[in-house]
Every structure is written in C-alpha cells, then in structure tokens.
Amino acid sequence: MKTSYTSALLFIIFSLSTLSAQNFKFAQITDTHIGTETAKEDLERTVEDINTQDLDFVIVTGDITEMGTDDELALAKEILSKIEIPYYVVPGNHDTGWSESGGVSFIKEFGYDKFVFEHEGYKIIGCASGPYVRMSDGHIPRDAIVWLDSVLTSTSKDQRIIFANHYPIDNSFDNWYEVTERLKQYNTQFAICGHGHRNKSMNFEGIPASMGRSNLRAKDSIGGYSIISVTKDKALFNERIPGVKTLEAWRNIYLGKRSYDMEKEDFKRPSYKINDSFPQVSKKWSYHSNANVISTPSSIQNVIVFGNSTGTVEALSKDTGEKLWEYSTKGGIFSSPAAYRNSVILASGDGNIYSLNSENGKLLWKTKTGASVLGSPIIENDIVYIGGSDGNFRALNAATGKELWKFEGLKGPVVSKALIYDSKVIFGAWDKFLYALNKNTGRLEWKWSNDSPNRMFSPAMVIPVAANDAIYIVAPDRYISAINAENGKTLWRSNEATVRESLGISNDKEFLYAKTMNDTLVAFKTTRKSPEIAWKLDMNYGYDHVPSMIIEKNKTLYFGGRNGIVFSVDPKSCKQKWSYKIDNSMINTVNVINDHQLVAATMDGKIVLLEWKP
C-alpha cells in the first residue's frame, strides 16, 4: 500500500513539474530585409530590446536580407550575434532567390539553413525555403524534405512540435502538402511564418498558425517583433514595439493533444489529369534526386548529366534513368552542364569550374575562382565562356581549364548562360546591365541598361538571342528589348505583352517567342525598327513567372511552366500540340534531344525523359 502511494505521489510530482516546465516565452523576428533603408537601425533596436526581455530564445523566420548578398548577410549576422540568448534562423526567398552564392554564404554565416532543438518538452523545427537563384513559387527544398523526414522519424508521436518557416505552408508553396501531410502525423501544436509583413491568424490544413509582422518600421517610426508565450494549454501572441511597449495579445492558440484525421480530410492536391488528354506523350523514366535541380541537364553519349543544390553532379543512363556515377562538389550547383568531347563542364557554388569525364565522372580539371559560380558555360572553338559571382567573366581553355582572359568589371553575379554572336559574347548580370565583350580578348565593347534603379529588374536571368544584328532580351521589368549588336544602343522596347524572363528564337531567325506572365505565348517578328507581334496563343496555363527558355526543334516549340508542365506548340498553325505534367514545381529550360524525346528537370529534383509520337 505504501509503495503504491509513493509511486502515485511521485507520478503526480513528475507530472506537475513537466507541466510547469512547459511554460516559456520566445521572440519571433521576421522580414528584416537588411540592405533596405531603415533595416539596420530597426534590427539593432529590436536586438537591444530583446536583451531587456525575459525570453528563452529567438527565432528569425527569413527574409533576413533584401538581396542575399554576402555583405548583407555579414551585416545581419553581426547584428543578430548581439542577442544574448540562443537564436535560430531560417532563410526566406529574398535570402535565396537572388543569392550570389546559391545559398552557400547563408550557411557559412549562420552555420545552417534549418534547425531542430528541444525546449521544455517541445521539439522546435525550422525549415529552409526558397526558391533558390530563380524566380518561382515558394518551395521547401528537396534536401530539406529529406531532412525533415529524418527529424520526424526520431520524434515521438506524442511530443509537442512547433514548426517555423518563412512562407505560409499553403499553396503559395508549390509543395506545401509535403509539409502539412508530414506534420499532421505528429502532435504539431502550431506553426509560425513571415513573408506577409503583418500579423495574421492562419490555418494550414488544420494546423493552427500565425504570421508575424515585419521588423521594418514601414510607415511607422519604429518597427516591431512578436513575443510568443507558451503555457500548458495555450500560446499567446503579442506584438512588441521595441523600447516602447508590448501590445495586448492579438491571438491565442489552444494547445493539447492534436489528432488530425488524415482519412476524412479532403484538401486540394495537384492534379495530373491533363496527361490523359495527350496519350501520345509518355514518361519513359523518372529519377528523383535528393536535392533541388535548378539547371538544364546535358545529354552526351547516351548519358544525362546534371547537378543539384547540395553540390552533387549525377549521371543517368539515357535509356533507363539508372544512376551511372556521381561527383561531389562543396557548393550548390545552379550551372547547366555543357558537353565538350568526352566531358561535361559546369560550375559550383564552391567557387570552382569543373570538367568531368562523362563516362565515369572522374575529374579532368578544375579552375578556382574568387567566389561562387552560378552561371552556365557556353563553349565555342574549344573555349569556355562563363560568368561568376566574384565580379568576373572568364574565357577558359576547354581542354585544360587554363584561363585565357578575364573581364573584371561586374558589380553583380552572373546566373545564366551567355550568347555568342559574331565577335562578341553577350550576357546579363544582377547589376542592372547587359554586357558585350570581345570574345577573343574580353575587352568591353558596350554595356546596356533598361534604366531601372531597381536591381531586381536586371536582365540577368534571360539567355539573350540575336538576329539581323540585333540582340533581344526580356527582363523582370516586363519589357522585351531590341538592342543594336554593334554599339549597344536601344532599337526598341515593348511592354505590350507582359513578358518576363523566358525567351526563344526560331531556327530561321524570323520570330522571337516569349512566355507572358498570364496564359499567353507570344511571337514577335525579329524587326529592328519597331516591335511587331506576329501572333498570340492563349494556352490557359495561368500565372507564370518562372524562367524557362522556349526551344524550337524541328519546327516545334517546347518550354516548361511554373506548375511542372511541359508544353509543345506548333508555331506555324499556332496551336498547342500537347502538354504533360511531371511535377508541381517549376520546370527548368528543357533539353530537346531529338524530334521525339526531351529531358526535363524540376526544382524539386525530378529528372524525367519524355517521349512522344512525332
């Protein structure tokens, strides 16, 4: 009897101590946007204020910087390091989408881009989100999903979870359901996010959630952050005005044992029914990498080669999709490989340009640069032309990697592939300029700007095309521009069609093809005097802002879209031939291998060989 009484008493004491231990408070800082006008002062004020509060830790939910530059990240780290309690960070789209390092510098500064820790009986999980280096929808990286699986596998079904991310976990993410379906198998209490710059009650398919206000002052004189108080049965959300006051709680979430009924729920999921309408198209094979793929795979000697965002180069059999070899670099790869003889040449976020044997993946040579290299190589007459993030554009010997010349005048990273036209190599950078260099010497021939003061409107992502001594580009300012190839003077500009960063040219150089941001594929004539639209085709693909160049092969057009669909169009009849959905994330520029096959890669790391009846 005495033993039973003692055991019961010990159980009660243990239970009470456990419940008491669950009381804690933490701060959420979000959308600090270091690099904008008041961001530094606003964050410094918040950090100073946090150090006067009775808090357990701080979570920073992304968009820490404005453009993800190395200088912005270093400044953000310097300020955040003054917090006197533990703090944890995850990146947002502004930290990754224009990153000059492809996310490498974020990890170098903070040591990670996702986190998990235990506090007072809770498991607190923070996940990375993109897009990375490309404009696209929000996306939890493939490697982060793999990591999340490993975290949850080691978590008790009863343990309380708090989930932190930059984006809301809804359809502003292209793979939101991969997160909600996982979290609902566990005792997830609530989620926090940023991105929207305001306090907002949210619900992610049954998971209670809250969006926090931006740390920026905006139209106020002082910015702000959130204080979240967790007790046994509820979480209270207060806005804190640094140095002034804590406002009344604007939200409370009741806590307890969560039970999400996965079988009865009927939430919307991506549909692949469109594939039933085009039976002439089929998927020969599909391969899923363990990380994002944000480039165009190369096809060489029956081998498909690509790199992923964790720095691995992978090679697959063109016939079966079976992995043949892999090679590891030390930085994310956003560079599309170029075939050269029996090798592939590509670059990495680790600052090196690599040449690998296409049969076995053995290193043939590598050339070190001063920073990450996110640009893609183009090869002509045994010379590799490629731009990096160290302010340089280079020409290398394709056989040896020896530098032939270097242009040092760039003020932003190169993230796309150059055009070689006559005696010039032409490319854009995230410094507001399009450059034309002498391809033999690297001498600057001219540089062009759309005169926008906003770096985000730079002609950096498009691959330029040329005809009739004119260079044609599209950019995020939603103009198509024609530029004199000799002197860099503007011939004409048009925003009649809301184009963005996807462009192509017909094999006969008579037409330009551009994807608009809403439903329509448009063709312009390659005129020098004034813009002239030849035709428009309503394709009903919805809103689309992702860069995926339009490729013409055997009088047929091919391009990818925002929601994982590959399109084929007959430009002569101005009719869609077919479309095929392979994923729900963006399609990179496709590689059309022949008149009945292409290989496509998605941001989520899916590599697919499509084939169709010609």
Image: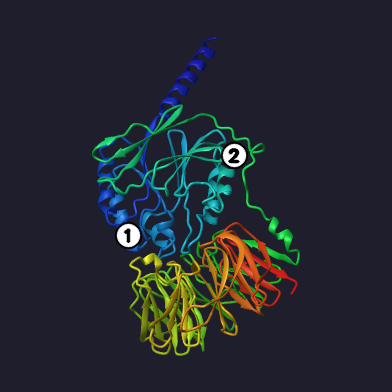
In the picture, measured across the screen, residue 232 lies left or right of residue 359, that is left
> Which quadrant would residue 412 be assigned to in this image?
bottom left
Q: Is residue 255 depicted above or below 351 in this figure?
A: above
Q: Is residue 122 depicted above or below 300 in this figure?
A: above
Disc 1 is placed on an element classified as helix
Q: Along the polypeptide, which appears first: circle 1 or circle 2?
A: 1
Q: Which amino acid does label 2 sit on?
A: Gln
> Which residue: 35% across, 74% down?
391
Q: Report the front residue among 586 and 387.
A: 586
In the picture, measured across the screen, residue 570 lies left or right of residue 194, that is right
Q: What's the distance in space between the residues labelled 1 and 2, CA to CA?
A: 38 Å
> Which residue: 62% across, 67% down?
600
Q: Which amino acid does label 1 sit on?
A: Glu
The residue carrying mark 2 is 185
Q: Report the front residue among 88 and 524.
A: 524
Residue 384 visible in the displayed image: no
Q: Where is residue 535 in the image (x, y as percent from the top left)?
A: 59, 74
Disc 2 is placed on an element classified as loop
**Location of the N terminus (image quadrant):** top right
Q: Where is residue 190 in the image (x, y as percent from the top left)?
A: 48, 37
Give me the disc on residue 72.
Answer: 1
Residue 64 visible in the displayed image: yes
Q: How crowded is mark 1: few (under 14 residues within 10 Å), some or many (20 or more)?
A: many
Report how many numbered discs are placed on residues in the image. Answer: 2
In the picture, measured across the screen, residue 254 lies left or right of residue 342, that is left
